[in-house]
Structure formats: structure tokens, C-alpha cells
Amino acid sequence: MKTKSKIIVSITGASGSIYAKVLLDKLTQLMPQIEQVGVVMSDNAKDVWKHELGNEDYQHYSEFTFYDKNNFYAPFASGSAKYTTMIVCPCSMGTMARIASGISNDLTTRAADVILKERRKLILMIRDTPYSLVHINNMQILTQAGGIICPATPSFYSKPQTFEELAATVVDRVLDLSGLEINSYRWSE
């Protein structure tokens, strides 16, 4: 029997709250495969969510444990808690830069540092565009350290009809990368 995943979701203040919402919705549906989900949201993430989605529905995911962005007592601030995957969705360029530089100044960057040092799965769903050379160099550093850069670039071959379906084209890819079994559109199937 497959071991259940322990997942960290960090939501930063980058534009793209729809991706975070779709991710949380899909993780809710996948709970039979998951032991635990810990969520960290920055203050900017909450503001952007309210602005872009017009609500504060992030408060209604009772199946997950939410942690303050500065709570270094959260279990995943240590490798001994054995969280298997961390998804930063959406990931701001500032967060990516701090992770690439090893700056652990909040729970998101500390958890990412732990995931990388333990050789577990770190997935950064970067949202900003275009990329500067600084961004590209940070992506290279993180990729060489074992992280996965998954830009929030939707696909269209499944013919998405809503914003949620469009966001799901990226979120489903992230869930695949996480090792979770999902029912998703597959090319040529």
C-alpha cells in the first residue's frame, strides 16, 4: 500500500489566487491519499485573494491546518516531521529568490529550506512574467538543488471553458509532479 503524502502548501502574494483556490479544492478531493496538509499564507496572499476572487474563502478549508507565516514551531519547520512535498502556489519572484539564497526568514522559506536539505519534493508554481536574468539564475539554482520550477502557464488542448478549468490545467500538472493519483486530461488518451 502506498504511503500517504504529507504536503505543505504555501500561498504567496503573487497574482494568481485562482491557482491556489483550485489547488486547495483539488487537495480536498484527494484527502484519501493524503495524511496531512499544512497551509501557510502571507498577508499579501490574503489581500490578493480578496482582490482577485472577491472573497475570503481561504478561511473555509477546515480539513487543512493553517499556520502563521512566522510560526517556526510548525511541524514542517523541521525535517523530522517528514513532510514529503511542498507546493508554493503561486510563487512570487521574491519568495523564489529568498529560497534560492537560503534565506529562511519566515515559515515558507524555512519549510522550503527543509524540503531541499532533506531531498524531498519542492514545486514552485511561479507566476510572474517576463523573467529577468536574476529570475532565471534563481530558477537554475533551485533546479540544481532539486526543486521543480512549474510556471503557471496553462494549456489549452483540453479546451477549458472557465477560469477554474484553465487554472486546473496547471494545478493538475503540479499534482502529477507531487505523485498524487488524479483524474485529469491526458494528451492523446
Image: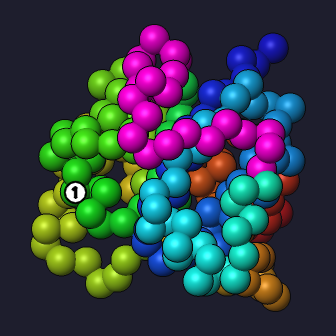
**Compared with residue 142, is residue 48 higher up or lower down, i.e. above or below?**
below
Compared across the picture, whether 72 is left or right of 45 comes to left
Q: Please name the residue shown 63% across and 28% down the image.
A: 6
- Where residue 91 appears, as percent x and y from the top left, is 42, 62
Colour scheme in use:
rainbow
Residue 167 belongs to magenta span: no
Compared across the picture, whether 66 is left or right of 182 comes to left
**Compared with residue 9, is residue 14 higher up or lower down, i.e. above or below?**
below
In the rendered image, which residue does mark 1 sit on? 97
Q: Please name the residue shown 86% across and 47% down the image.
A: 29
**Where on the picture, by quarter, is residue 184?**
bottom right
Q: Please name the residue shown 34% across and 82% down the image.
A: 129
Label 1: state its secondary structure.
Answer: helix
In the image, the segment drawn in magenta is 61-82
**Where on the picture, by quarter, is residue 79?**
top left
Q: Quadrant of the C terminus?
A: bottom right
Q: Please name the residue shown 55% across and 66% down the image.
A: 46
Residue 157 seen: no
In the rendered structure, which amino acid carries the disc numbered 1? Answer: Ala
Residue 161 seen: yes
- Where residue 149 appears, as percent x and y from the top left, is 39, 56
